[in-house]
Amino acid sequence: MNRSTVQVNALQDIQEEMPSCVAIGSFDGVHRGHQVLIERMVYQARAAGLRTAVLTFFPHPRRVIQNLIEPYYLARLEDRVRWIAEIGVDIIVTHPFNESVRQMRAVEFVDALCAHLQLRQLWGGRFSLGRNREGDIPTLQELGRSRGYSVELMTDLTMWNQRPVSSSRIRRSLREGDMADVNGCLGRPYLLRGVVSKGEQRGRTIGFPTANIACWPEQLLPANGVYAAYAWLGDHRFPAATNVGVRPTVNGRQISVEAHLLDFDADIYGRELSLEFMERVRPEQKFDGLPALKTQIEKDVAVVRRLLRP
């Protein structure tokens, strides 16, 4: 995270009150549209001599309101915070979204922003605040007139390949394995991180050892299949043939993420591995046995080498 950025877990944790511009949203994935909104706020705030703040909710409001249990997030919270900080924001509030917050009236939430952040500009796209979304744009603007803040809206949509960028679009493309669209909308490769754990080690028996990644179970995985990815161990990057799926050839039951790091052979159990997904090579398939699987993996590795050639 940017050294000058302060992160707090709730509005009441803010130590220093300063006149602030505040952007509010889930910002899941911090995609191109989110980046543009926050960059505009930072630019205007600096010109006006104001502090910048981003308030992002965790858990995601939809998971609470709709009681979602399946994987949903596009990034871990710590990555979301890091990407927002890199834009140059002064303070990031990772405010909990729970039943109490859900039932807050819009005026209560606005008054909390004014009290803890000395709100001067409220930034967002198509958003609302408060119970039953009662704090729509006209309501927030009316409250602003009496409390001394303006509402700054980003009305122009950020486009990628002639279509609007949105988190829902990214989720659809992930489920289809369309990494070109996912990465284009994000402005960076899709990232999964986790600790390398011991699997069944079948890959080693056929000459293709894999690192089994214990990913955050609430993050959305790309569609089942084989991918060209970059694996990061600390500051070192390796091309990796990466499989997402249930391994039907060996009658797997649970979905897993396994990466075969090319030209690499070291014990990395217990270390954190980050995977940047670049392109889908093929969907997941069931083969007649391990010899047929080995032959296909050899072809997959050759494709990955070609796709990720320096």
Image (tube, rainbow, N blue to C red):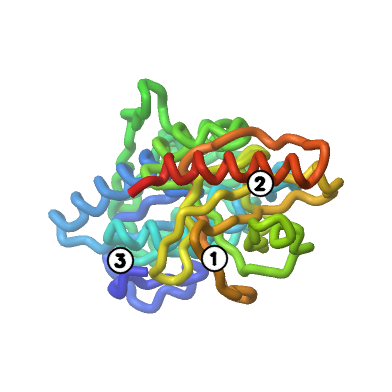
Depth check: give the residue in front, 3 or 250: 250
Badge 1 or badge 2: first in the primary sequence: 2
At label 2, the amino acid type is: Val
CA neighbours of label 1 inside 10 A, class few (<14), some (14 to 19), many (20+): many
Residue 275 sits above or below residue 273 on the image: above
Residue 20, located in which quarter of the rendered image? bottom left
Label for residue 90?
A: 3
User: In this view, which residue lies farthest toward the left?
Assistant: 47
Give the position of the N terminus as an image quadrant: bottom left
CA neighbours of label 3 inside 10 A, class few (<14), some (14 to 19), many (20+): many
Residue 296 sits above or below residue 71 on the image: above
Label for residue 244?
A: 2
Residue 122: image x %, image y %?
35, 48
Residue 114, located in which quarter of the rendered image? bottom left
Badge 3 or badge 2: first in the primary sequence: 3
At label 1, the amino acid type is: Leu
SS under mark 3? loop
Q: Which one is closest to the eye, mark 3 or mark 2?
A: 2
Which residue is pictured at 37% across the width and 29% down the height?
160
Depth check: give the residue in front, 308 or 90: 308
- Tell me the distance, in whole angstroms, between the alpha carbons under discs 1 and 2: 15 Å
Viewer can see residue 259: yes
Residue 242: image x %, image y %?
59, 49
Q: Which residue does the numbered mark 1 point to in the structure image?
A: 273
SS under mark 1? strand
Which residue is pictured at 60% across the width and 75% down the height?
267
User: In this view, which residue lies farthest toward the bottom?
Assistant: 15
Q: Which one is closest to the eye, mark 3 or mark 1?
A: 1
At label 3, the amino acid type is: Asp
Depth check: give the residue in front, 223 or 38: 223
Residue 131: image x %, image y %?
61, 45
